[in-house]
Structures are given as C-alpha cells and as structure tokens.
Image: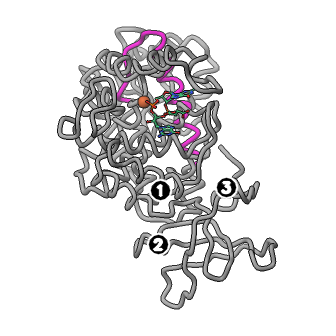
Amino acid sequence: MLKKISVDQLVVGMHLKEFCGSWMEHPFWRTGFVLTDPKDITSILASSIKEVWIDASKGLDVAVGQVAVSEAESDAQVEADLLAAVSERRETAPVSTDVEIQRAAQICLQSKQAVISMFQEARMGKAVDTGGAQRLVEEISDSVARNPGALISLARLKTADDYTYMHSVAVCAMMVALSNQLGLDEEQTRLAGLSGLMHDLGKAMMPMEVLNKPGKLTDAEFAIIKSHPEEGHRLLLTGRDVAPMVLDVCLHHHEKTDGSGYPKGLKSDEISLFAKMGAVCDVYDAITSNRPYKAGWDPAESLRKMAEWSNGHFDVKVFQAFVKSLGIYPIGSLVRLTSGRLGVVMEQTGKSLTTPKVKVFFSTKSNMRILPEMVDLSASGSHEKIVAREDPAKWRFSDLNELWSGQAGI
Ligand code: C2E
Ligand code: SIN
Ligand code: FE
C-alpha cells in the first residue's frame, strides 16, 4: 500500500518512495529505500518538504491510530499526484535574463546532480526512473518559459568534467525552446524536453577513459562510442511506459539527413521530426561547450559553422527554427558595434534576430576597457548596429562569461 504522509509521521524503518512538492526542494535525489539513519529524517524535517509517499509493503506503516493524508494503489497514481502538485505551482511569467540567471544556476546545479544519479543507477542496472525526470523537465521548461535564453546559455558554461551530465540538461532546455518555436503543443513539448534529457543515457555504459579521452578517438574507440544510441535505447526500455518519442530520439539523434549517420543510416524522410530536433540541439551544445577533447566555440560562430554543415547533416527547416529560438547572436556572443565598441549579447529582444541587448565593455578605438553599459539595439533611438562577430579566442577577455552571467562558472 502506497501512502502519502506528513513528514512528522516519518520513522526509521519506513520505505521512502517519493518526496512531494517541487523537485528543486529535495535534499536528496535518491528515493526508494528504507530509512535507517535518523539523520535522514532530521534533514527532511529541516527542509521545506511537508509530505512524502511511503510504501508500506516494503517498510513500516504509519503508527496505529494515525491516518495517512492519502493512499494510492499504483506507482502511476503516485506519479500523477506528484506531477499535479508541480503543475499547480508553475511560475512562467516572463523575467529578464539577469533575474532568471540566478534561478537557472540553481536549476542547473540540481539537475546535474539528478543526471549524475540517473547515469549511476543505469550503470548499476536499475530500471530508469522517468517520473523524477519528468518533474525535472517541468522545472527546466518553466525556466525556458520565464526566459528562453538564460538556462541554455548558463548550461553552456559547463566544465569538461561535467560535460556529459550538463549536456543532457542543456539539450533538454533547447528541445523545449525549439518546440515552442515550432509551435508544438504542451504534451509534445514536454516529451521533447524529456527526450533531450535522456538522449545520451547510453553514454553511461561507455568506458570513461574513452569518453573523457583528451584527444582524438581511434577508429576502434569511435566504433565503441557509436553504440551509445543503441545502449541508451536498451536502458530506456527497462523503464516503465517510456514514450515512443523518447526512445526514438535516443536511438536516432546521430542520424544525418544525407544517410551518413548512425546507427541505421536513415535518410531525411525516414528520420522523425523529434530526432531531427535532437540532432541540431545535440551538436550546438557539443561544439559550444568545453569538452575533454576540444574547447568550446563562440555561440554565433557555432551557428555559422552549423549552417555550413546543415546541408547533409540537419533538416534545414528545423535548423532555421533553432536559430530563431536562440537568435543569430545567442546570449554570450562577442560582437562589435558600429561605434567600434565590443560587447557581449545579454538578451534577445524578440523584435529582430539581429538587434539583441548588448553589454558593451571595451573600446577598440582607445583599445581600453570602458565602464560596462547596456545597449538595446532594438530601441527606436538606437544608432548602433552589430557590424561583426568577434572571436573570443583572439581577444581573450577572461571575464567574458562573467559579464553576461554574473557568475564565474557553474
Ligand atoms: P559529443 O562530444 O557530445 O558530440 C556530439 C556530436 O556533435 C558529434 O557526434 C558530432 O556530430 C558533433 N560534433 C562535435 N564536435 C564536432 C566538431 O568539431 N565538428 C563537427 N563537424 N561536428 C562535431 P559524433 O561525431 O557521432 O560523436 C559522438 C560522441 O563521440 C561525441 O559526443 C563524443 O562523446 C565522442 N567523440 C567523438 N569524437 C571524439 C574525439 O575525438 N575525442 C573524444 N574524447 N570523444 C569523441
Ligand atoms: C574531431 O575531433 O574532429 C571529431 C569531432 C567530432 O566529430 O565529434
Ligand atoms: Fe549522442
């Protein structure tokens, strides 16, 4: 019997099934174990969690004379209850990038932990838990709704060590933003986000020394890595009710429209819309991130490179929608304005893809730093325009990311 109880009814010996409330408030990600350490109960009581689900068939029941808040017959009922609670308190009103960045940093940190646990559990042979993942996707989609660029840009600042985990979070957020751009409905958007989160799960089964190899892979090593879509697909099949879209994106995110991808070498019309979306988001986050084998490229430069490859690799319509969802100069791009000042892109303005808000901080005329100032290129009185992308590798501003994100890294 599954029972929802108040946290002050918890005792050692109960089987903790799930935490109620926002996923972000959970002090641990792991659930589904018998409480043996009184300290765990103390930390639950100290947290903002008010209720939990217990499984009375796997541990102690509530004390005689006490009543549960509610009861459920199946895991599906518990998951529906948890999702409903999250949906009730969704916050999606638009906010500026600097406001959302604070919250996005928190979501990124916790999401990374959650993905690490998900990969560990997959390695231990446990069935995949998409219930927890779904609630995570809701947090990420709400951040994208409040500000489409904040979390996506912040997730790009991952370190090479964290790459695989934060990459899942980043692709999840981009799949949501791209679905919104394509006008997909809420259910499809949610599934697209979930597909993004799970797409590289198969990397959990890849040898760490190959995945984190600092240099180019040998043919034999690449042959191993190429099995990750099938490995991920196999792992996802162990989960309960994993949606066909999630399975499809996992298996086919490395297919290319000209048929040269893997595992099946599918051609454009054989690849689903969602797998095509996955391919674009996957490559963009890969090349803009620092990875064990390559340093990340500037976001605007990356879009330009992808446009060159798009014929053959990507679906052109999907790629165009992707560019619209990020802007031609995504947040964090280094640009030169007509005045000769250099700035970093802070925010899209929604009016035109080429008129974002830019924080200027350097004068190429005097070759000196200037007091940072926000310039809205979409403002009617603005005389400034972007004249060029600038190569951050050439300028080497050590605080470039801090300038737009307000933080040194995540
Ligand atoms: P990943 O690093 O997440 O990259 C995902 C995909 O982004 C790649 O799939 C590829 O389609 C695209 N991509 C990434 N970097 C570049 C690039 O510099 N140029 C171009 N044109 N495309 C790029 P792919 O190639 O099938 O690789 C799958 C995974 O295999 C990679 O995921 C990474 O984990 C691993 N891998 C590939 N090459 C190397 C390498 O030389 N060294 C190491 N350590 N890992 C590699
Ligand atoms: C390379 O290191 O050039 C291969 C990158 C990739 O295709 O992932
Ligand atoms: Fe992959």
Cα separation between marks 2 and 3: 20 Å
Identify which residue, 376 or 136, lies in the foreground.
Answer: 376
Q: Is residue 92 visible?
A: yes
119 is within the stretch colored magenta: yes
Q: Which mark is residue 304?
A: 1
Which residue is found at the position 58% from the left and 53% from the top?
298
Closest to the observer: 344 or 39?
344
Q: Assess mark 3: CB under 8 A from ligand 1?
A: no
Q: Which residues are magenta?
A: 105-131
Question: Residue drawn 67% across and 71% down?
Answer: 342
Quadrant occupied by the C terminus: top right
Q: Quick check: can you spot residue 121?
A: no
Identity of the amino acid at label 2?
Answer: Thr
Amino acid carrying mark 1 in the image:
Arg
Going from N to C along the chain, the mark reached first, 2 or 3, is 2
What is the C-alpha distance between the residues marked 2 and 1? 14 Å
The residue type indicated by label 3 comes to Asn
Q: Quadrant of residue 246?
A: top left
Q: Nearer the viewer, residue 136 or 215?
A: 215
Horizontal and vertical percent position of residue 375? 60, 78
Q: Earlier in the sequence, mark 2 or mark 1?
A: 1
SS for dot 1: helix
SS assignment at label 2: loop
Residue 401's label in the rendered image is 3
For label 2, being within 8 Å of ligand 1 is answered no
Q: Which residue is mark 2?
A: 354
